[in-house]
Amino acid sequence: MMIHVWPTVNSNMDAQLHCRHKSMSAIIGKNGVTHHKHEGDMATPLGTFPLRQVFYRADRIIKPQAALPVIPLNPQDGWCDDPSSSCYNQHIQLPSSFRHEILWREDAVYDLIVVIGYNDCPAEPGKGSAIFMHLQRPNKTPTEGCVALTEADLRFVLAAGATEITIHQPR
Protein backbone atom coordinates (compact mmCIF):
# COMPACT_ATOMS: atom_id res chain seq x y z
CA MET A 1 0.00 0.00 0.00
CA MET A 2 1.25 3.46 -0.95
CA ILE A 3 1.36 6.46 1.38
CA HIS A 4 1.80 10.06 0.21
CA VAL A 5 3.61 13.05 1.70
CA TRP A 6 2.58 16.54 0.54
CA PRO A 7 4.75 19.42 1.81
CA THR A 8 2.85 22.51 2.90
CA VAL A 9 3.21 25.55 0.66
CA ASN A 10 5.25 28.37 2.29
CA SER A 11 6.75 26.04 4.92
CA ASN A 12 9.94 24.10 4.34
CA MET A 13 9.36 21.60 7.12
CA ASP A 14 5.60 21.04 7.47
CA ALA A 15 3.83 18.35 5.48
CA GLN A 16 0.75 16.17 5.42
CA LEU A 17 1.05 12.39 5.18
CA HIS A 18 -1.94 10.61 3.65
CA CYS A 19 -2.61 6.96 4.50
CA ARG A 20 -5.91 5.38 3.54
CA HIS A 21 -8.62 7.78 4.74
CA LYS A 22 -6.43 9.62 7.24
CA SER A 23 -4.35 12.77 6.87
CA MET A 24 -1.72 13.41 9.53
CA SER A 25 0.81 16.10 10.32
CA ALA A 26 4.39 15.27 9.33
CA ILE A 27 7.71 17.05 9.66
CA ILE A 28 10.26 16.90 6.82
CA GLY A 29 13.76 18.25 6.16
CA LYS A 30 14.72 21.75 7.25
CA ASN A 31 15.27 22.74 3.59
CA GLY A 32 12.06 21.20 2.24
CA VAL A 33 12.10 18.73 -0.64
CA THR A 34 14.49 18.25 -3.55
CA HIS A 35 14.96 16.29 -6.78
CA HIS A 36 18.75 16.57 -6.29
CA LYS A 37 19.41 15.14 -2.82
CA HIS A 38 22.98 15.12 -1.54
CA GLU A 39 24.55 14.25 1.79
CA GLY A 40 24.02 16.94 4.42
CA ASP A 41 21.64 19.17 2.41
CA MET A 42 18.89 18.92 5.08
CA ALA A 43 16.28 18.21 2.36
CA THR A 44 13.84 15.33 1.89
CA PRO A 45 14.13 13.51 -1.45
CA LEU A 46 11.23 13.69 -3.92
CA GLY A 47 9.99 10.49 -5.53
CA THR A 48 8.45 7.10 -4.89
CA PHE A 49 10.42 4.71 -2.69
CA PRO A 50 9.85 1.29 -1.13
CA LEU A 51 9.70 0.96 2.63
CA ARG A 52 12.34 -1.64 3.56
CA GLN A 53 12.10 -2.56 7.24
CA VAL A 54 11.22 -1.34 10.71
CA PHE A 55 13.54 -0.98 13.71
CA TYR A 56 12.22 -0.33 17.22
CA ARG A 57 13.49 0.04 20.80
CA ALA A 58 12.02 -3.05 22.48
CA ASP A 59 13.17 -1.71 25.85
CA ARG A 60 10.93 1.37 25.42
CA ILE A 61 7.98 0.53 23.17
CA ILE A 62 5.95 -2.50 22.14
CA LYS A 63 6.58 -4.16 18.78
CA PRO A 64 4.59 -2.45 16.01
CA GLN A 65 2.25 -4.31 13.67
CA ALA A 66 3.61 -4.03 10.12
CA ALA A 67 3.69 -5.71 6.72
CA LEU A 68 7.45 -5.07 6.72
CA PRO A 69 10.16 -6.95 8.61
CA VAL A 70 10.30 -5.65 12.21
CA ILE A 71 13.66 -5.82 14.00
CA PRO A 72 14.48 -4.83 17.59
CA LEU A 73 17.38 -2.39 17.92
CA ASN A 74 20.42 -2.98 20.10
CA PRO A 75 23.09 -0.54 21.36
CA GLN A 76 25.51 -1.57 18.58
CA ASP A 77 23.16 -0.58 15.73
CA GLY A 78 24.23 2.26 13.47
CA TRP A 79 23.72 3.60 9.95
CA CYS A 80 26.73 4.52 7.80
CA ASP A 81 26.52 8.05 6.32
CA ASP A 82 30.15 8.24 5.21
CA PRO A 83 30.37 8.45 1.37
CA SER A 84 33.95 7.07 1.51
CA SER A 85 32.76 3.78 3.06
CA SER A 86 31.74 0.66 1.14
CA CYS A 87 28.91 0.45 3.71
CA TYR A 88 27.52 3.89 2.76
CA ASN A 89 23.77 4.15 3.42
CA GLN A 90 23.60 0.75 5.11
CA HIS A 91 22.77 -0.62 8.54
CA ILE A 92 26.06 -1.35 10.36
CA GLN A 93 27.23 -2.69 13.69
CA LEU A 94 29.21 -0.35 15.93
CA PRO A 95 31.91 0.50 16.64
CA SER A 96 32.84 1.76 13.18
CA SER A 97 35.71 3.95 12.05
CA PHE A 98 33.45 5.49 9.38
CA ARG A 99 31.06 8.39 10.05
CA HIS A 100 27.69 7.02 11.13
CA GLU A 101 24.45 7.66 12.95
CA ILE A 102 23.84 5.86 16.22
CA LEU A 103 20.39 4.27 16.09
CA TRP A 104 20.26 3.56 19.86
CA ARG A 105 19.64 7.15 20.95
CA GLU A 106 19.05 8.79 24.32
CA ASP A 107 16.08 10.74 22.95
CA ALA A 108 12.99 8.95 21.59
CA VAL A 109 13.31 10.02 17.93
CA TYR A 110 14.59 6.59 16.81
CA ASP A 111 12.45 4.48 19.14
CA LEU A 112 10.53 3.57 15.96
CA ILE A 113 12.24 3.81 12.55
CA VAL A 114 11.06 2.84 9.07
CA VAL A 115 13.86 2.59 6.51
CA ILE A 116 12.91 4.39 3.29
CA GLY A 117 14.55 2.72 0.27
CA TYR A 118 16.21 5.87 -1.00
CA ASN A 119 19.65 5.63 -2.68
CA ASP A 120 20.16 2.04 -1.64
CA CYS A 121 20.04 -0.14 -4.74
CA PRO A 122 22.95 0.44 -5.10
CA ALA A 123 23.92 3.41 -2.94
CA GLU A 124 25.59 6.24 -4.83
CA PRO A 125 28.20 7.92 -2.57
CA GLY A 126 27.20 11.44 -1.55
CA LYS A 127 23.63 11.21 -2.88
CA GLY A 128 22.13 11.03 0.63
CA SER A 129 21.75 8.42 3.33
CA ALA A 130 19.74 7.45 6.39
CA ILE A 131 16.38 8.57 5.01
CA PHE A 132 13.84 7.23 7.49
CA MET A 133 10.34 7.71 8.79
CA HIS A 134 10.84 8.21 12.52
CA LEU A 135 9.26 9.89 15.53
CA GLN A 136 8.82 13.64 15.81
CA ARG A 137 10.73 15.60 18.42
CA PRO A 138 8.44 17.07 21.10
CA ASN A 139 9.13 20.61 19.78
CA LYS A 140 8.45 19.46 16.17
CA THR A 141 11.79 20.72 14.83
CA PRO A 142 12.63 19.81 11.23
CA THR A 143 14.53 16.67 10.28
CA GLU A 144 17.76 16.36 8.31
CA GLY A 145 15.81 14.85 5.39
CA CYS A 146 13.59 12.24 7.01
CA VAL A 147 9.81 12.18 7.48
CA ALA A 148 8.77 12.41 11.14
CA LEU A 149 5.38 11.46 12.61
CA THR A 150 3.91 11.02 16.06
CA GLU A 151 4.20 7.49 17.42
CA ALA A 152 0.44 6.95 17.10
CA ASP A 153 0.45 8.07 13.45
CA LEU A 154 3.52 6.02 12.54
CA ARG A 155 1.93 2.95 14.15
CA PHE A 156 -1.26 3.61 12.14
CA VAL A 157 0.75 3.80 8.88
CA LEU A 158 2.56 0.55 9.66
CA ALA A 159 -0.60 -1.30 10.76
CA ALA A 160 -2.33 -0.14 7.55
CA GLY A 161 0.23 -2.16 5.61
CA ALA A 162 2.26 0.65 4.03
CA THR A 163 5.04 -0.65 1.78
CA GLU A 164 5.77 2.41 -0.41
CA ILE A 165 5.98 6.16 0.05
CA THR A 166 5.67 8.97 -2.48
CA ILE A 167 7.09 12.35 -1.48
CA HIS A 168 5.54 15.08 -3.64
CA GLN A 169 6.26 18.70 -4.55
CA PRO A 170 4.20 21.23 -2.53
CA ARG A 171 0.70 21.71 -3.98
Image: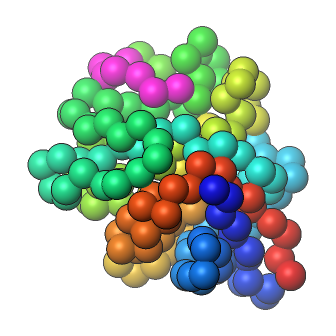
Seen as rendered, the residue at the extreme top is: 86
Q: Residue shown at 65%/63% (left/top)?
A: 3
Let me know if residue 9 is in the magenta part: no
Q: Residue shown at 34%/54% (left/top)?
A: 65
Q: Position of residue 69 (x, y in %)?
A: 42, 37
Q: Position of residue 116 (x, y in %)?
A: 59, 45
Q: Quadrant of the N terminus?
A: bottom right
Residue 167 occupies quadrant: bottom right
Residue 91 occupies quadrant: top left
Residue 2 horizontal side relative to residue 115, left or right: right
Residue 136 horizontal side relative to residue 37, left or right: left
Q: Position of residue 100 (x, y in %)?
A: 45, 31
| 78 lies above or below 24 | above
Of the pair 109 and 162, the residue shown nearer to us: 162
Q: Quadrant of the C terminus?
A: bottom right
Q: Residue shown at 66%/43% (left/top)?
A: 50
Asked whether residue 18 is in view, the answer is: yes
Of the pair 41 and 130, the residue shown nearer to us: 130
Q: Position of residue 77 (x, y in %)?
A: 32, 30
Of the pair 32 and 154, the residue shown nearer to us: 154
Asked whether residue 100 is in view, the answer is: no
Magenta stretch, residue numbers: 90-96
